[in-house]
Amino acid sequence: MVQENYREVEARVKAACERCGRKREEVTLIAVSKTKPAEQIRELAAIGVRDFGENKAQELKEKTEQIPEALNWHFIGNLQTNKVKYVVGRACLIHSVSSLHLAEAIQKEAKKKNLFCPVLVEVNIADEETKSGIREEDAVALVRQVAEMPNLQVRGLMAIAPPVEDPEENRLYFREMRRLAAALDTMGIPGVRMEELSMGMTGDFEVAIEEGATMVRVGTAIFGERKKPS
Ligand SMILES: *Cc1c(COP(=O)(O)O)cnc(C)c1O
């Protein structure tokens, strides 16, 4: 079932790339496996899927222990500073750096483990009170601060767009993210590379690809509905 779903999503990603004249390799499809069992992750790994997304530090730790295979684990959730130790060294990319405080905790842990940790800065693009992410007007300052941290590298930006009925409603937010990334790029902040734009989920990933997403995070369309709200 998950294999079939994945293939369908993959076909939609490919079609979206073709529609807007992008190469399929420009977009990483991340299978968001949060709350789902290791068995389903193994099923996908068996057909060559390598990129998975998790949003809880403890769950990431458990899954990497259950599945020793070399997979690319993306950390996409709210991260508390006391849980940073579970994520640094396990995640290939932390998508959700949204405060100086958190970045400092990641820097400290990465230094302790003598690791280099690529991160994305999460932007609260729709300025929703309930959403995580730094406000757009504060994003440049945070990128500059993280750029100073020797064990961190800013690879781009991440956003969670609002839940909408019609994905077209989020097109402007995705476009704004791309504009912000381009603006940051022209600032030429040393050590900052705006290579990745992580945006688009089950409800809107095709529009996100059309607007320049390089990573889409898809859970429900691959694994089905989640029981727990998260
Ligand atoms: C759960 C989650 C997703 C996947 O959401 P779906 O709508 O199930 O595709 C993507 N990004 C983040 C940050 C998430 O927490």
Image (tube, grey):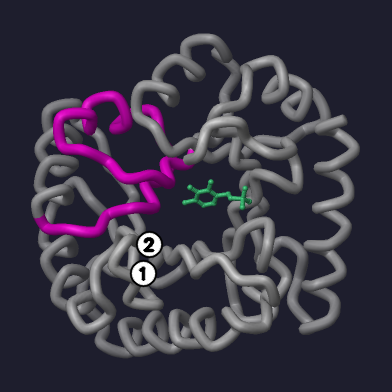
Residue drawn at the location 46% of the way across and 63% of the way down: 160
Q: CA distance from mark 1 to mark 2?
A: 5 Å
**Is disc 1 surrounded by few (<14), some (14 to 19) or many (20+) residues within 10 Å?**
some
Q: Position of residue 69 (x, y in %)?
A: 60, 18
Q: Quadrant of residue 116?
A: top left
Q: Is residue 32 left or right of residue 92?
A: right
Amino acid at circle 1: Arg
Does 80 appear above or below 162?
above
Q: Is residue 87 magenta?
A: yes
Does the magenta-highlighted stretch encompass residue 69?
no
Seen at 17% across and 61% down, the residue is 146
Residue type indicated by callout 2 = Arg
Q: Which mark is residue 181?
A: none
User: Mark 2 sits on what residue?
Assistant: 155
Q: Are marks 1 and 2 in contact (CB under 8 Å)?
A: yes
The tag earlier along the polypeptide, 1 or 2, is 2
Estimate how packed mark 2 is, as few (under 14), some (14 to 19) or many (20 or more) residues with alpha carbons within 10 Å: many
Residue 40: horizontal and vertical position, in percent? 72, 22
Q: Position of residue 50 (x, y in %)?
A: 65, 35
Q: Is residue 54 left or right of residue 188?
A: right
Question: Regarding mark 2 in the picture, which secondary structure is present there?
Answer: strand
Q: Nearer the viewer, residue 126 or 129?
A: 129
- In the image, residue 120 lies at what x, y percent? 35, 59
Q: Quadrant of the N terminus?
A: top right
Q: Which residues are magenta?
A: 74-100
Residue indicated by mark 1: 193
Side (left or right) of 136 relative to 75: left
